[in-house]
Amino acid sequence: MRIVAEHLFYTYNPRSPFETAALKDVSLTIEEGEFFGIIGHTGSGKSTFVQHLNGLLRLPSSLKKYRPKKPRKGDVSRPKTVLTVGEFDLADKKTDFRALRRNVGMVFQYPEYQLFAETVAEDVAFGLKNFSEEKLSPEQIAAAVKAALEVVGLDYEEMKDKSPFELSGGQKRRVAIAGVIVTRPEVLVLDEPAAGLDPLGKREVMELLHKLHREWCKTVVIVSHDMDEISENCTRAAVFADGRVRYVLPPRELFRHAAELGEMGLDVPLTAKLCAQLEEAGVHVDCDYTTEDFCRAVLAAWREKKEGAR
Amino acid sequence: MKAIEFADVSFRYEEGGPLAVSHLNLSVEEGEFVAVLGHNGSGKSTLARLSNGLLTPDAGSVRVFGQTVNEKNLFDVRSQVGVVFQNPDNQTVATIVEDDVAFGAENVGLAREEIGKRIDFALRAVGMEEYRHATVARLSGGQKQRIAIAGVLALMPKVVILDESTAMLDPRGRREIVDVVTRLNKERGITVILITHFMEEALLADRAIVMNRGELVMEGAPADIFERREELVTYNLALPHIGIICEKLRAGGMDVAYTLDAAVLAKEIAKCVS
């Protein structure tokens, strides 16, 4: 499913002293099959944007009570807002939002805090029961839960009757992710999926996301503060700042804008920092800023120099 | 003077369960900056909780500035050893910054005037004086953690322990906290114990120790600890990103020093390539 947003606006607490414009004319397209990154400082609008993708935040025109206002004199005319996820038109009040939520999985920050059921199996089944069109048989539910637990790397028989609260932190996070992907969403959105984990835990979570991207969900969207995570994993990334999208680029091009990103309070990956410092020393390294490619490029330059010296 | 001294300390959470800390001997000098590294479940948080009497050892003794921690001197010990925990949202009690910072100082029964001075001092020390009247809920994670540190500082402790206090913060928040504690240590001579799983942070310390299964398994200058990378991996500690790059370049045959400093690595590479 392709995600298309055009001229998206969102204001919290409108017409009150706390009014804050969180999205100011955001246009962004995420293609099916991407591993997409969303970057931005706290308060940049990135969370507001992703909460639109499964209808947690709604466009006014998709609400039942919505009546189009008659244009008045002095109104600022805004371009038409478009928001579609695959065949779902999120600006339309006839859209089936339950079906949308089945298809767009949302994993919040620290999802393990949302575990609540008595057993792992019940917890994972919760979303499935709630978002399904027809009533599922216990066998169907068990089969779906089993598949979801197994894809996140947990053994169904061993886990199903355990309390989610007696698991380790890493296992809890996996159970929480299983509870979202159990509806087989085509799009999976994760807010800071690796936050709070130690380096090994981070690596495991990112490996899991790649596995899900290959086998389970066509499109993966991650919100992250960690630029290394973005450069290592994403096909493209969007940079949010002050409610607007400033860049939508592959990491290779994005992280050349170190100065501009710095102004927005954002960092660049370690490899990009090294490239910049090398550039100053008169060495140009052409790479896509993944660790792999950076080392390849440096080693190639070094071999070339050695050959030349001979 | 030894700030904190563990003598053959063992502790388990449940009877019959595994030892969370096992025969630990460790001493931290006053004014020292010690980093504690370890995988989840290695016992590093238990160490923090034993240091200010939140937990009592099953065997051995914990001494704080020479006195053995027991029920009678618990409050005294806690005013000397402050702990900042992981989750910024779990550590604030009041809605307004200054009230939150004052909470600990009020509880030990200081005079009103004195509390005012302590708030000034603590907020200045963490660089948050402009936020004195701000709403805690509207602060960023890094700012909330700085408020939590200020709350501890208001008790004028001699030791501050940070128990993974940066784990839930974004890179900017993490830098804020590390800057604040480094300053507290260098400028005010406060003893700092920084528990973390980010090796980059441990580099700033005078000494680093590594815990594994409740035991102290490595100890030394941070740079020396990182040199022993095969050993680190056996304790389930991942190399920092820059370490991985060094390794890969060396594996490819390049003669670059093993360093965790990006500027140094860039120079090394430039030297080899140009």
Image: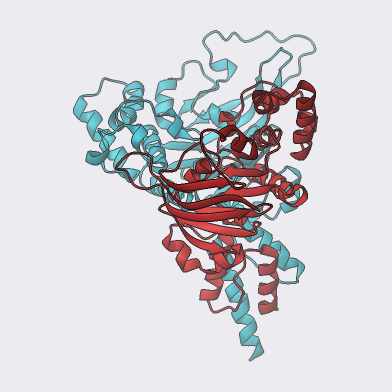
Residue B35 visible? The answer is yes
Q: Residue at x 43, y 57 (%)?
A: B236
Q: What kind of colouring is applied to the model shown? A: by chain
Which quadrant does the N terminus of chain A fall into?
top left
Tell me if A252 is positioned left or right of A206 in this view.
Answer: right
- How many numbered marks does the figure carry? 0
* Image height of B176 relative to A13, above or below: below
Q: Residue at x 24, y 41 (%)?
A: A158
| Occupied quadrant, residue A301 | bottom right
Residue B150: percent from the left, percent from the top? 70, 35
* Image height of A43 relative to A96, above or below: below
Which quadrant does the C terminus of chain A fall into?
bottom right
**What tint does the image give chain B?**
red
Q: Residue at x 52, y 19 (%)?
A: A92
Q: Nearer the viewer, residue A274 or A5?
A: A274
Q: Nearer the viewer, residue A279 or B215?
A: B215
Residue B258: percent from the left, percent from the top? 59, 71
Residue A34 visible? The answer is no
**What tint does the image give chain A?**
cyan
Q: Nearer the viewer, residue B270 or B89?
A: B89
Residue B246: percent from the left, percent from the top? 57, 69
Residue A2: percent from the left, percent from the top? 49, 37
In the orientation shown, which residue stands out farthest toward the left?
A139
Q: Nearer the viewer, residue B134 or A286?
A: B134
* Image height of A208 relative to B123, above or below: below
